[in-house]
Amino acid sequence: MAMSGVHLLFLVIFIPASVASRRNLRLSPADVVVPDAEAADTPTTYFEVDRPLRPPIGSSGPCSTLLMSHSFGFTYTKPPVTAAYSPPDCLVAAGGGASAISLAVLEWRATCRGVQFDRIFGVWLAGAELLRSCTAEPRPNGIVWSISKDVTRYASLLAAGNSTLAVYLGNLVNDQYTGVYHANITLHLYLRPTQPRQPAPATAPADMIVPVSRSLPLNDGLWFQIQNAADVESASITLPPNAYRAVLEVYVSFHGQDEFWYTNTPDGNGPFREVTVLVDGDLVGAVWPFPVIFTGGINPLLWRPITGIGSFNLPTYDIELTPFLGKMLDGKAHELGFAVTNAVDVWYVDGNLHLWLDPSTGGTATTASLVSYDAPPLAANTTSQFDGPNGQYYTTASRRISATGWVESSSHGRITTNATQTFTFENTNTFTGDGTTETVNQTTVIYTAVSATDLAVGAVLYSQQAHQNFPLYMDTEEKQQTSHNANLSYTVARGYHETVVAAGEWLSGPHHRSLRNTQSGAVDFETRDGKEVAASWGTRQTYIREATDGCYFRNVTSSGYGISSDESNEVCSSLPATATGASTAQLFKN
Ligand SMILES: *[C@@H]1O[C@H](CO)[C@@H](O)[C@H](O)[C@H]1NC(C)=O
Ligand SMILES: *[C@@H]1O[C@H](CO)[C@@H](O)[C@H](O)[C@H]1NC(C)=O
Ligand SMILES: *[C@@H]1O[C@H](CO)[C@@H](O)[C@H](O)[C@H]1NC(C)=O
Ligand SMILES: *[C@@H]1O[C@H](CO)[C@@H](O)[C@H](O)[C@H]1NC(C)=O
Ligand SMILES: *[C@@H]1O[C@H](CO)[C@@H](O)[C@H](O)[C@H]1NC(C)=O
Ligand SMILES: *[C@@H]1O[C@H](CO)[C@@H](O)[C@H](O)[C@H]1NC(C)=O
Ligand SMILES: *[C@@H]1O[C@H](CO)[C@@H](O)[C@H](O)[C@H]1NC(C)=O
């Protein structure tokens, strides 16, 4: 999808039973024909389960501004679509400051009809990415979907002067792939009744955001394209002299040969991937990504109407770079780069560097130094055990990156920041039934901790610990009759789980949030002459969020294109966070 103008023939290709190799997990939407035989006469609504965004109590708004309205037809290899951005009148009337914004929501709403691939797209403001997303695959009679993303952290860009909004959505339209994506992008702003005289240091949205991406003009997205494991893509960045905190937010998506990296066998560099972040060539942090499955992935029906976790609103990953400010605050340009361990063509990666600046008059220069740094090499291992076509690959990996550094500013004195990332990864890829069944069971566990301390007075200004856990289970069974006729059953179960606690003098009080977002689905289908001719499918998703800033519970089940049960509320009840195992998917068989 998206990465190439020329789509290979996405027929189901059957693997010779003697080789444990990657399966083709992409069908052309033109070959998913049957379920639309009884197509609806009205557009179908697709959705990603997410919490509704609520402004803080006392906020006014929303004031809504249509930023762009565009039909994405044949846009592949064309420049991104752009629109002039200027801060909305309501924000200007409120004094114009970023701190007037209590909640900013970016809404993408789109329709499409006909036949079309899922297309990856990005939305950038002043070169900084605001949204990475994947379109929904249409039906002949049309679909509609929308995404609402909290973009409050980009308040400084929204309030800054005039700039350019750019959207790249590389689409191809021809006789077979007829779908044109009609999209509106709207900004909804909620404002505070009174602006704080001084925003909370380091924990309010950043004072400045520096894009770590490619610059216009381009006939592509502003993301870097990383095509292999040796590829390093970077931007040259000069920091303002008065920065005292730096956090790099990373956007990442994977396509082409690495779209299903977690199923890769050794001939495709195995299933382990990480994005590494480099400052002047030195490792400063890493991203072990959540395995987002796009709307055309595995089997497109699995994502209709409930789309995969993160597919409409891809997760981003924050890396605390404050300990490394000592390397970067010399007024000189530094290379901020990305690489992808084991990459196969292609990864789209870019970032936003969020910077907090010393508010003292004249912006006095800060000084900084790295105190300690420890990043042992990646530990990774794959073992394989096969008896003919049956057997398994077992891959493990782990990494730790830890750094401490201080920054001294005239407003805040000397602050010592300690940042640690710890990762573990385990993947089992099992082939049974003489290669007819493949099961992938993977877990990524991530722990990150940041603490900012004023050692002179022993005060913790800000500390945060986050635990994330991304389990993935995927089972594919392919019963072949002839080379192009088969019965296939696919099951996918996964979760995006995280717990975050934060405290310290710079916060108004302790914060915590926990999310258990679990999705499992299954599809049974039959192909004849390479086309899908019969199918049944269903998905269940439970989303349980408990947090100091609001709770949300949703439990929704789909069967075919219909919703068979749907329950939601915003009550903070301490619901037991039940782990939903892969076995749930069995409920949807038949
Ligand atoms: C976009 O906005 C225009 C003007 O308000 C409206 O006519 C159109 O239906 C909208 N399209 C979508 C996809 O919401
Ligand atoms: C910003 O854009 C608005 C709307 O296009 C325009 O009226 C205004 O003059 C611009 N301001 C600056 C400083 O360029
Ligand atoms: C990889 O794992 C195998 C089996 O557990 C072990 O024998 C081998 O020493 C490991 N290799 C490395 C480099 O850790
Ligand atoms: C930084 O954090 C690590 C891990 O939590 C801890 O072992 C270390 O003592 C901390 N260092 C400082 C200087 O606080
Ligand atoms: C997946 O692997 C984990 C261990 O990594 C194990 O606890 C779990 O039971 C496995 N799940 C399935 C469905 O096999
Ligand atoms: C595929 O399933 C159909 C019923 O849905 C059955 O008639 C046919 O025998 C099956 N073929 C194989 C190869 O299992
Ligand atoms: C979700 O809904 C299904 C069907 O109504 C029900 O069986 C299941 O227990 C519910 N799960 C939770 C966590 O409420």
Image (tube, rainbow, N blue to C red):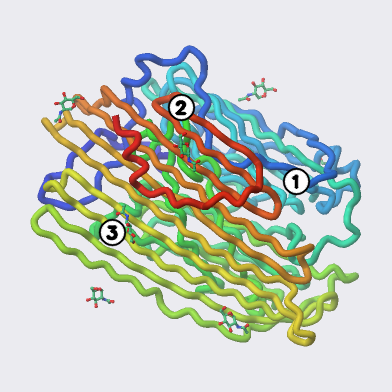
Question: Compared with residue 443, is residue 42 higher up or lower down, i.e. above or below?
Answer: above
Residue 513 placement (x, y as % from top left): 62, 56
- Report whether 499 appears left or right of 360: left
At x 30%, y 33%, the residue is: 589
The Cα–Cα distance between marks 2 and 3, rounded to whole angstroms, is 33 Å
Residue 244 placement (x, y as % from top left): 74, 72
Which amino acid does the dot numbered 3 rest on?
Thr
Residue 9 placement (x, y as % from top left): 27, 34
Confirm whether residue 171 shows in the render.
Answer: no
Task: Check disc 3 and report the residue beneath it.
Answer: 428
Number of other residues with Cα within 10 Å of mark 2, as a class: few under 14, some 14 to 19, many 20 or more:
few
Residue 314 placement (x, y as % from top left): 53, 47
At x 72%, y 79%, the residue is: 453
- Report whether 117 appears left or right of 590: right
Which amino acid does the dot numbered 2 rest on?
Ser
* SS at circle 2: strand
The Cα–Cα distance between marks 3 and 1, rounded to whole angstroms, is 42 Å
Q: Could you say which disc has been placed on residue 177 in the image?
A: none
In front of the other: label 2 or label 3?
2
Question: Compared with residue 436, is residue 268 higher up or lower down, i.e. above or below?
Answer: below
In front of the other: label 1 or label 2?
2
Q: Looking at this view, is 582 or 435 the one in front? A: 582
Q: Looking at this view, is 8 or 301 the one in front? A: 301
| Disc 3 residue: CB within 8 Å of ligand 5 | yes
| Disc 2 residue: CB within 8 Å of ligand 7 | yes
The quadrant in which residue 110 appears is top right
Confirm whether residue 502 shows in the render.
Answer: yes
* SS at circle 3: strand
Task: Check disc 2 and report the residue beneath it.
Answer: 564
Q: Quadrant of the N terminus?
A: top left
